[in-house]
Image: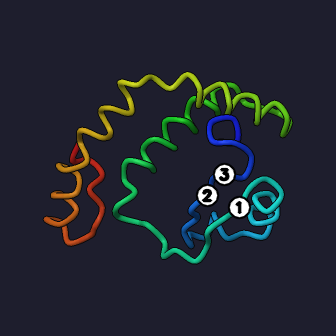
Amino acid sequence: MDKEFGKWNWILMQDGAPAHTSRSTKEYLSKKCSVLENWPPIRRISIQLRIFWGIMGKRISLEAPKTEKKLEAIVRRVWKNIEWGVIENLVSSMEKRLRLVVEHKGESINGHF
């Protein structure tokens, strides 16, 4: 983000999900960027984002990084090489996924795609 928008010209919007509020996560982020906190946890709306991170996680785990430095390098490379088709498919399926969430009254829609 610093490369794209300039150092500190952006803010990370962080929701209140437990993985985002751990002490180690907060300490790390406080050293790296400005964080807009106290957003409510985004559970149902972030379906595409969770799918995206699932794709990232699978690709990263295939390389089984052993050090933090290696993990960071792999994450950056995987992020940079995500195909636009993957992102376009997630965006184009958003309306259908939201309709399914409403139909299922907020319950899981896993297995419907």
How busy is the neighbourhood of tag 2: few (under 14 within 10 Å), some, or many (20 plus)?
A: few
Residue at 57% across / 29% down in the picture?
Answer: 59
Disc 3 designates what residue? Answer: 9
The C terminus: image quadrant: top left
Residue 19 position in % (x across, y down): 63, 64
Please tell me the numbered disc located at residue 104: none
Q: Is the residue 70 above or below the residue 28 in the image?
A: above
Disc 2 designates what residue? Answer: 12
On the image, which quarter does residue 64 sit in?
top right
Residue at 85% across / 35% down in the picture?
Answer: 69
Q: Are marks 1 and 2 in contact (CB under 8 Å)?
A: yes
Residue at 20% across / 72% down in the picture?
Answer: 105
Q: Is the residue 108 above or below the residue 10 in the image?
A: below
Question: Tag 3, which secondary structure?
Answer: loop
Residue 90 position in % (x across, y down): 32, 39
How busy is the neighbourhood of tag 3: few (under 14 within 10 Å), some, or many (20 plus)?
A: few
Question: Tag 1, which secondary structure?
Answer: loop
On the image, which quarter does residue 29 sit in?
bottom right
Q: Nearer the viewer, mark 3 or mark 2?
A: 3
Disc 1 designates what residue? Answer: 34
Q: Amino acid at mark 2?
A: Leu
